[in-house]
Image (tube, rainbow, N blue to C red):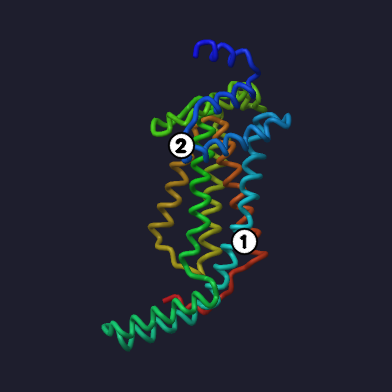
Amino acid sequence: MYQTTIALHRLPLHLTHRIYRFLHTTSSCYNLFALGSTALYTVHGTGVPWWAAIPLTTLLIRSVMLPVVFWSRNRMIRYARIKPLIKAWEFQYMKLSYFDSEKIKKLNQKRNELFHRHSCHPIGSLVLPLVQIPLFFIMTFVLRGMSGSSFLLFSGLNVPVEVSLAHEGIGWIQDLTVSDPIGFLPVCLGLISLINIQLNLDFYKEMVSVPIFLTRLAQGNALVFTFVSMQAPTALSLYWVTSSLFSVIQNLVLHFVKPLPYFPRHFKK
């Protein structure tokens, strides 16, 4: 084992990384983290410095997810088109037969048949967040590990520290393993997050009524996330800012390319 360690230290960093991952086998769950690491090293292996490789990898991963995004958007559009009919049914049944279990059962059956006919069951809306949220955390933990910082829960991921992150920055962020010294990226992250929250409120107000306390909670979380990023490695802040900016542009494109149909306001109640 000692000889193997010495041999690894004599190899170039990128080869050491590959052998390190080969010698330390992990469960299938951790293979997802290896995929995130591989994506970063693949882009960096083209000769791109880390300050550009991290945003480029983020854009690449988010672009790969676009088919799922458009699939989910098309389902949302179909659901919006039939929602006035569903609301009319619900109003009629609830008014005339609120305590009639048979009528309620019939309403649910008709509603499910309509969802099936138009391929727009609301449960399908969970697909996109079920893919995006784990991916977000995977890339977060991988970049934290590469920067020399890791959560205790994932301390066994065997993500090696990437020493070149310390000298492949740009401008005022030469060392990507430490936090942004002037706090520019965290502030950008907070502003972009708040913009994205407002866009979602404006674009989806015809689909769902969001309680004001949930809006304030989301805005508060964006501010908390800003302070968290002030303590995070700059490599991680680069990923968060790029991903958040992509979300804003994606929402704008979807709003104008695939707008949600408008339905009368009284159907919302």
Q: Judge by depth and name the residue closer to the eye, 179 or 96.
A: 96
Tag in front: 2 or 1:
2
The percent coordinates of residue 56 (x first, y second) are 67, 40
Q: Is residue 254 visible?
A: yes
Q: Position of residue 192 (x, y in %)?
A: 56, 47
Q: Which residue is located at x 55 percent, y 52 percent?
A: 195
Placement of 129 over or under 17, stated as above or below: below
Residue 48, by quadrant, is top right
Q: Is residue 178 visible?
A: no
Q: Residues within 10 Å of mark 1 (few under 14, many from 20)?
A: some
Q: Residue at x 66, y 64 (%)?
A: 256
The residue tagged 1 is 70
Secondary structure under the numbered disc 2 in the rendered image: loop
Q: Are marks 2 and 1 in contact (CB under 8 Å)?
A: no
- Horizontal placement of 184 versus 101: left or right? right
Given residues 110 and 216, the one toward you in this image is 110
The amino acid marked with disc number 1 is Phe
Q: Amino acid at mark 2?
A: Ser
Side of 230 where 167 appears, left or right = right
**Residue 261, position in %: x, y?**
58, 73
- Residue at 60% over, 21% down: 16
Judging from the image, what secondary structure is the residue with disc 1 in?
helix
In the rendered image, the vertical position of residue 24 relative to residue 115, given as above or below: above
109 up-or-down from 43: above or below:
below
Could you say which disc has been placed on residue 186 in the image?
none
Tell me the quarter of the picture where residue 199 sits: bottom right
